[in-house]
Amino acid sequence: MSSTAVSSTADVLVIGGGGSGMSAAISAATSGATVIVLEKCPNVGGSTAMSVGSFTAANTAYQYRAGVNDSIELFVEDMKVANGEFEQRENKELRRILAENAGPTVEWLGSIGVQFLGPTPEPPYEKPRMHNVLPNSGAYAEALLRECRKRGVVIHTSMRVEELLRNAEGEIIGARANGREYFGRRGVILATGDYSASTEMKAKYVGEAAAKIPAVNPNNTGDGFKLGTEAGGVMIQMDRLYEGLRFAPSIRVDPIKMLPSHPLISKAMRLVVERLPRKILAYVIRGALTSWVGPNNTMYRAGAILVGHGGKRIANEDSDKAMARATAADGKNTAYMIFDERVATKFSAWPNPVSTFPGVAYAYVDDYKRYRPDVYHRAGTIEELAASTGLDPAMLTASVEEWNAKVAAGKDGDFDRQHLGQGVTEGPFYALGPMNAYITLADGGLAVDTELRVTTAEGEAIPGLWAAGSTGQGGLQLLNHGLHIGWAMVSGRIAGRNVAQAPSRPDLRVTAGLAVG
């Protein structure tokens, strides 16, 4: 995918070719600037192309067509509610920027060929604001790449940036990648994603237990964070990871993931799905839902337990974080949910889904039997269930018996679980798994101002350096679905426009390099 262009100097240099980086590149190019993008992976797309693809926004044409009367103020108020205890540390200025620009950014994405299904509800939001990309998140990457090419953006892939470059005035003027120097006359934008795959950073900011959990995107190694701090920036609010369990990847072809992302196909799909009855649409999506999403915690509250690869119960099932960390520490990063007929019956119909795609589709126990027979197990006895899953029969039997005794006593002496449910007592018995622990996202980021310039601990802008997406999250909380992709695109567009309008530096002579480490 690397461009054949040989130029190493442009008005704007973007480091990272995910959703935020390509949005920044397009924004800069349409503002009259020449642009070079350096992407360390063989292909562009980043975490944006690996996501579910939800984009939460207010005041969109999709809302208007659906008769939803929304406002920026309502959007901000709902984000306050979603933040809960974290509202006290919210970057309110950046939140306002996100709220005001998310809707126009959905419309901009539509102008370059991205289509959405929506808006759909997303509690605790009052208004339906979640726009789900069609046919899958690869549509973002395809549309952004197509627009980059249209606008003359030069993209170099397989280019890991080793250090930022400074001139004699202390301005950031470029970067060194694969031994070669690249320059941005007006500025450099860091858009390298989060740090979810950096064992070192996870251990330092969250803890050793979290550091053992692999990332959904193994390329998110925090390069931009390290480059930015070497340049004088500061990382803030680095203490929160999205830790949880997911089913092992399906060996069956996911038809939704396989659909091409051509604009005409996406538009045709939107027209079709908007006219499908809800029940039929939900049925179509369930196959993908059972591949993408782990079971809801409400199943544990009803009595299910989590066991490790040997069959022993390993964690307090009240906590996603505790289950993920225990699974990752259990040797094989493998766990199973165990439950009985009473729980299976409860989670076989509304309002108790096993997994959820809010407002669109819900998957129940029988859906896993139909779509994911590789993770669905049912047996008349616990010993037979152990044989089906490969778990140790004696250990699994002991775990279930010990759990039932705790439920009867009303106390979990091992992990202090508070919601015990009714135990695992009524056959037939079920297991869902294997499941693996993953970190989906890492919050935190470089401190930035409202122009997306990277700032020092004293709040001063570092000359020549901007950041976007997770790299430039700047204290935003983003505690509901669809906000991270929204911020990636919104911040990228703003950063690209601002760098394109910055004065051109005449001095591109390198006097210092700032290594990523």
Image (cartoon, rainbow, N blue to C red):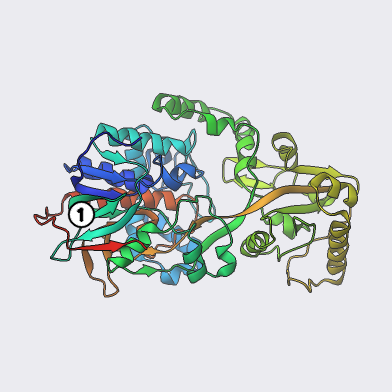
- In this figure, what is the number of numbered marks? 1
Q: Is residue 433 above or below residue 241?
A: above
426 horizontally vs 58: left or right: right
Image coordinates of residue 344 in percent, x first then y, are 79, 47
Residue drawn 35% across the image and 65% down it: 92
Does the rendering let one see residue 65?
Answer: no
Does the rendering let one see residue 78?
Answer: yes
For disc 1, the marked residue is: 187
Q: Which residue appears farthest toward the left when viewing the image?
A: 506
197 horizontally vs 188: left or right: right
Residue drawn 52% across the image and 47% down it: 121
503 horizontally vs 432: left or right: left
Image coordinates of residue 71 in percent, x first then y, are 38, 51
Q: Is residue 87 above or below residue 272?
A: below
Q: Which residue appears farthest toward the front when viewing the image?
A: 179
Q: Residues within 10 Å of mark 1 (few under 14, many from 20)?
A: many
361 horizontally vs 317: left or right: left
Residue type at the position of mark 1:
Gly
Image coordinates of residue 293 in percent, x first then y, are 61, 46
Q: Is residue 106 above or below residue 441?
A: above
Secondary element at tag 1: strand
Image coordinates of residue 108 in percent, x first then y, are 32, 39
Q: Quadrant of residue 98?
A: bottom left
Query: Which quadrant holds the N terminus?
Result: top left
Residue drawn 45% across the image and 54% down it: 220
